Image (cartoon, rainbow, N blue to C red):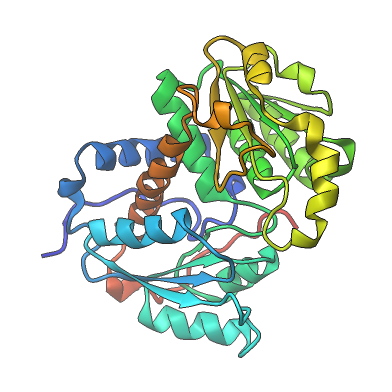
Amino acid sequence: MASTRSFKPLAHKDLLSLAQLTSDEVQALFQTAGEFKRNPREFLHALEGQTIVLLFEKDSLRTLVSFEVGMAKLGGRAVYLDHRTNRIGQREPIRDYAKNLERWTEAIVARTYEHSTIESLAKDAKIPVINALSNLYHPCQGLADYFTLQERFGSLDGLKLAYIGDGNNVCHSLMIGAAKLGLTLTVIAPKSHQALKKVIDQAQVFANDSGAKITISDDPAVVSGHDAVYTDTWTSMGQEDQAAERVKVFQKYQVTDKLMRSAGPDAVFMHCLPAHRGEEVAADVIDSPRSIVYDQAENRMHVQNALLLHLLGSKSASTKLKPKHHASVLA
């Protein structure tokens, strides 16, 4: 029997970027994620009879398993379509893909190389589309990261996060999330690999409203005085031919025990994984008590389940084909 519990819908039908969420919506997601994490059995039938489809152009461990297992824990099911060798839109137009999938499923979860692919799916599909990673953003990871920090410190108020490494999709989502939630975020990266200017500018606009402080630097020494230090792989999927060059560029940005000690005695270490010990992070850091990387990984499922509940838990199957508002984010 399907659950009669209802969840407040989000302002947008899709989640393409954290820019679409208000701080109140993020906190509502965190509240639901916390409830699910404490007592998952209460949600066993919440999405009973509903199906999501996972369209993945990239390899995945955490994203794939957390969505599949998470949907099962909500009483629904997930169908996986492997697009690692056949890009979405290659065999048939993205519009046709979207229009077919909206007839069979309740949501599309897409992990793609190009952000434009996810935007096209969202534009053409009347069902929700969730960005499970693109070259521009990784919003589900960002939600899990800030939920983990709130869980660890009790509150995000006054929290200072330092991100060091490549100004990539994870960095972009952390910036937008910090700006929305009012955090202090310092992004430390080589000048040649900073976050995109259009994302920095957008984050600053949100920061002006929330009181957040976003600082861009290329000096690892500014990590001092932060509550958490976050890094990501120096070479993302699709950049393998640049690996040797990137290792040289990022060498002084490795998170070592010395860098963690300079951040502060109680600073925690974060990484979205997969990690390369000896490159972006030293083994004695990621495998130390300071590390909360596995908390982040676990919380991916909890915040994604909260997202699914707020996107699908207030809708019946009979309403899924009604037109819904779609707003584009970041041209």
Answer with left or right where residue 70 lies relative to residue 143: left
Tell me: residue 62, above or below residue 258.
below
Q: Nearer the viewer, residue 245 or 151?
A: 245
x, y percentage for residue 31?
34, 35
Q: Position of residue 23 (x, y in %)?
A: 51, 35
Which residue is found at the position 44% from the left and 19% from the top?
153
Q: Is residue 21 visible?
A: no
Position of residue 125 measured from the top left corner of the image (x, y, whole percent)? 51, 75
Q: Going 35% across and 63% down the picture, which residue do you hit? A: 68
Rendered view: 291 above or below 124? above
Q: Residue at x 31, y 36 (%)?
A: 34
User: Vertically, is 200 above or below 140?
Assistant: above
Up-down: is 99 above or below 328? Answer: below
Image coords of residue 75 (percent x, y): 21, 62
Q: Is residue 220 left or right of residue 134?
A: right
Residues 323 and 286: in front is 286
Answer with the quarter of the image where residue 201 lies. Answer: top right
The number of numbered badges drawn on the structure is: 0
**Quadrant holding the C terminus:** bottom right
Visible residue check, residue 268 = yes
